[in-house]
Image (cartoon, helix red, strand yellow):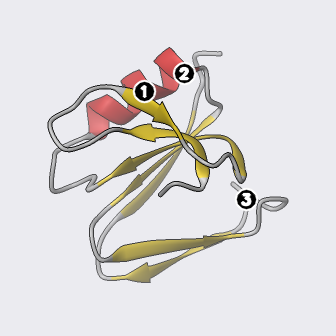
Amino acid sequence: MVMGEYQRGARGESKIIKGLGILKNTIIEPHYSERHSQQLLIEGMKKSGMKYGIGIDSVTGIVVDPIEFPSIWSKLGKGLVDVKTNSFL
């Protein structure tokens, strides 16, 4: 989850913090379904100005090529991965 430019802080914290920035223009919302974070992802995209948002459940991964994302990606694990595009920019 630290691969995006931004991510949510610790559990219960609404603060958005910097990630490693490997996946450009992307904010990542961990524990997506478990924490019912669908609205938080949209708010985080607006607040950070990121073009893409990834909601990802626990025990789940996403495989991306930074050049091909968001067109091509695949999910690993049993949980949900939700990729959103910011239409608010």
| Rendered location of residue 86, percent (x, y) | 58, 29
Label 3 sits on residue: 71
Q: Closer to the camera, 26 or 78?
A: 26
Q: Is residue 67 left or right of residue 1?
A: right
Name the residue: 18% across, 44% down.
11
Label 2 sits on residue: 48
Residues at circles 2 and 1 in contact by the CB criterion of under 8 Å = yes
Amino acid type at circle 2 is: Ser
Q: Earlier in the sequence, mark 3 or mark 2?
A: 2
**Extreme residue toward the right, this view:** 67
Q: Nearer the viewer, mark 3 or mark 1?
A: 1
Q: Under tag 1, what secondary structure? A: helix
Packing grade of label 2 (10 A; few <14, some 14-19, many >=20) is some
**Mark 3–mark 2 distance (CA, rounded to whole Å):** 22 Å
Label 1 sits on residue: 44
Q: Closer to the camera, 61 or 5?
A: 5
Amino acid type at circle 1 is: Gly
Name the residue: 21% across, 31% down.
13
Packing grade of label 3 (10 A; few <14, some 14-19, many >=20) is few
